[in-house]
Amino acid sequence: MTRPNVKFIPNVKDHKEFLLGRTTSDNFKDLPEVAFIDPKSPKRFDKIALSSFSRSGNTMLRGYLEKITGIATGSDGSLLQSMVKVLMDGGFVGEGLMDNRVQVIKTHYPEKIGVGVFPSDRTLLIIRNPLDTLVSDFNLITSGSHDESILDSDFDLFKKEWNTFVKDEIRNWAEFHEWWLKAVNPVHIVRYEDIKADPAKFLTPILEFVLKVNDIEGTQVHLNMLKVVEKGAP
């Protein structure tokens, strides 16, 4: 499968300085074009695992991060899988990449094993109410689509399968989060519901975690975030 042509950020240090530069809304021109980090860049960002149980908002947060920072995100998914291919066709150009072209990498490990294991320095952990998560995941499995749902009546039609699914997956949900909460690397936890309810409030500490700074208010990346939020969730 051919990956879309994407520009490269030649010097990641310069890009970070640009994002953290002081600015005002009067100076705003446009959001950055999503690009890969040049593997030959003299300095790299540390790797961040963007971890979540399936259907917990990983794709939504990736969309925010890409539009705000201009840096493509990766994943440990295989482009041979139709669901992963759909994401790349939908604009996530870093699908299947875990190398130095990307900093933030989507993973559902250890719930699901991707095409490979990548070293990470820190973790963004997205948590969603398991009741909503399991319904969404069942919809994904049965419909074969990221954005379609089965009928409410289908839950009665497949009551036996649904009940078995819930019993198995609620245990997997608990074990998944327990695994990450015991991780040695620093973990920043964010609730899916919080991002949906007040994206600006909760994206701010996420960006500060990603960029390793204490305060982004008044910077280019903060302004980018406000502009993206104004347009609505990705």
Image: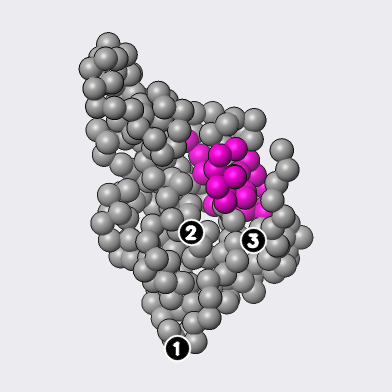
The numbered mark, 3 or 1, whose residue comes first in the sequence reads: 1
- Dot 2 alpha-carbon crowd within 10 angstroms: few under 14, some 14 to 19, many 20 or more: many
User: Would residue 19 be seen by someone viewing this image from the given angle?
Assistant: yes
Q: Which residue is mark 3?
A: 35
Q: Residue farthest to the bottom?
A: 26
Which range of residues does the magenta coloring cover?
Answer: 85-108
Q: Which residue is mark 1?
A: 26
Side (left or right) of 211 relative to 156: right
Is residue 94 left or right of 167 when viewed as pictured?
right
In reply to whether residue 91 is colored magenta, the answer given is yes
Q: Residues within 10 Å of mark 3 (few under 14, many from 20)?
A: many
Q: Earlier in the sequence, mark 1 or mark 2?
A: 1
CB within 8 Å, label 3 to label 1: no
How many numbered marks appear?
A: 3
Mark positioned earlier in the residue sequence (3 or 2): 3
Residue drawn at x 41%, y 39% as measured from the top left: 147
Q: Percent from the top left, x then y, of residue 221?
A: 48, 72
Verify whether residue 155 appears in magenta.
no
Looking at the image, residue 218 lies above or below residue 95 = below
Rendered view: 13 above or below 209: below
Q: Nearer the viewer, residue 119 or 199?
A: 199
Q: Is residue 43 visible?
A: no
Quarter occupied by residue 152: top left
Q: Indicate the amino acid at tag 1.
A: Asp
State the SS at label 1: helix
Tell me the residue that label 2 is attached to. Answer: 65
